[in-house]
Image: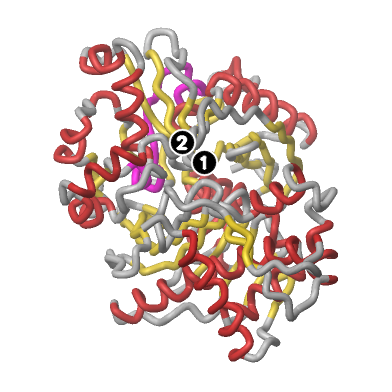
Amino acid sequence: MAADHAILSIDQGTTSSRALVFDKTGQQLAVAQREFRQIYPEDGWVEHDAAEIWRDTVEVCREALKKAGAPSIAGIGITNQRETIVLWERASGKPLHHAIVWQDRRTASLCETLRAEGKEAVVQEKTGLLLDPYFSGTKLAWLLDNVEGARERAVKGELAAGTIDSWLIWNLTGGNAHVTDATNASRTMLFNIRTQDWDDEILGWFDIPRALLPEVKDCCAPFGVAGKEVLGAEVPILGVAGDQQAAFIGQACFEPGMMKSTYGTGCFALVNTGTEFVASQNRLLTTVGYRLGGETHYALEGSIFMAGATIQWLRDEMKLIKSAADSEKLAAEASPDGHVILVPAFTGLGAPYWDPHARGAILGMTRDTHAADIVRAGVESVSFQTRDLMEAMGADMKGAGLSRPNALRVDGGMAANNWFLQNLTDMIGCPVERPEVIETTALGAAYLAGLEAGLFQSPADISAKWRCDRHFDPALPGADADRRYGRWKEAVGRILSR
């Protein structure tokens, strides 16, 4: 392998498409980013223009490669918003409808019907997931039911469907590859993570033809070759993982008990359970952490829908801050004895509540409540929700005979907020570690491609490259943290719909 070989990492997220170039040591050489439209056709519905995402992805890839000096690229790694689903025509490659985004709640009633029929236990046993509109399966069923002629065309083999990684690979390869990886497949609610195959029983519930779905590969594998017309040269696609699993890999969480939490639009925490499928007793998800060399490593996951998005709401809708960075300053200025609690259930609540009908609230305000108190409550809400996940994970790990996580590795945009990270470590009662490279999602995709290309030798090689930028230890007495957390639990109890 030539000394100047680099990796192109595509990080297709919820609000922007990015491309990053990493060298063979994992150092970032260049980045390009483009935000795209968020489409809200009805209350609780969220869509993206898949064609726009593809166009933006090509442009940021070309821009990043140019910024990096057009290095020789050993391979492409792809990471993506996981549960967002696209349905397209095989012949033309055109989407038949906007992509339905992971945040979308339009299939809540379908999930409730399936739950009433007693099917959630089957879903959890086979897929590790719960019945919630968050996942791709019910979204795909909605598309087949609501796009004219779609179901009939799907049966004839005229259509293809997949998560964003599949959509990008299809386009990069000129329609020559309809594939995904095990982590993205594990988020569809259609994939049996015990057998590592699409599940015929669940497909039958939704009348989804197998032929519509992509082939499922390891996270490191030959996924296809990007055409010369896209990037100026043929480049193999060698690594793929959903965004949270890519961050899991970028944080080098390869040993059982290691845990990371990514604070982007939402918050997603994963803890490694090794090769053991740990069925959650606390309404967490069991998911594929990664699959390498045909061996599946599982994780418990907790999903919070509003993390950085809460700060964005404080900025854009409430006008309480001018930039996300202002949230750190105002949170520090607020009274530490305030009782204001903000529950950011703007699109329902994720783990461990799974209540799509819950709605946001601000509680505990008095006449002397200031903007800083509300901003602090918004930032604190992310810490409280993380503790919800940690409590559930600890119980599940103990039940499986595994050790509770003894540290939390963090990344994502909110990880730059030192006040938040201190508040977080105080609330969860264990150390928080921020790595030197906080672009862990894109880095994880690059590591996967690099493993397949031979630039990195093993997961142990990746672990040796992880470096801590700053370590945070709890400073707040546990009794005080428990008191504040108790107010949070009381507030959540008031807004739950069931």
Q: Where is residue 402 drawn, in percent x and y?
A: 35, 79
Judge by depth and name the residue closer to the eye, 213 or 216.
213
Q: Where is residue 472 drawn, in percent x and y?
A: 70, 78
Residue that carries the numbered disc 1 in the rendered image: 81
* Residue at 32% across, 57% down: 296
Q: Quadrant of the N terminus?
A: top right
Q: Residue furthest top?
A: 92
Say if residue 366 shows up in the picture.
Answer: yes
Q: Quadrant of residue 59?
A: top right
Query: Would residue 109 be counted in the magenta stretch?
Result: no
For the residues labelled 1 and 2, the Cα–Cα distance comes to: 6 Å
Residue that carries the numbered disc 2 in the rendered image: 84
Magenta segment range? 170-188
> Which amino acid type is shown beneath numbered disc 1?
Gln
Judge by depth and name the residue closer to the eye, 171 or 462.
171
Q: Where is residue 363 drawn, in percent x and y?
A: 62, 65
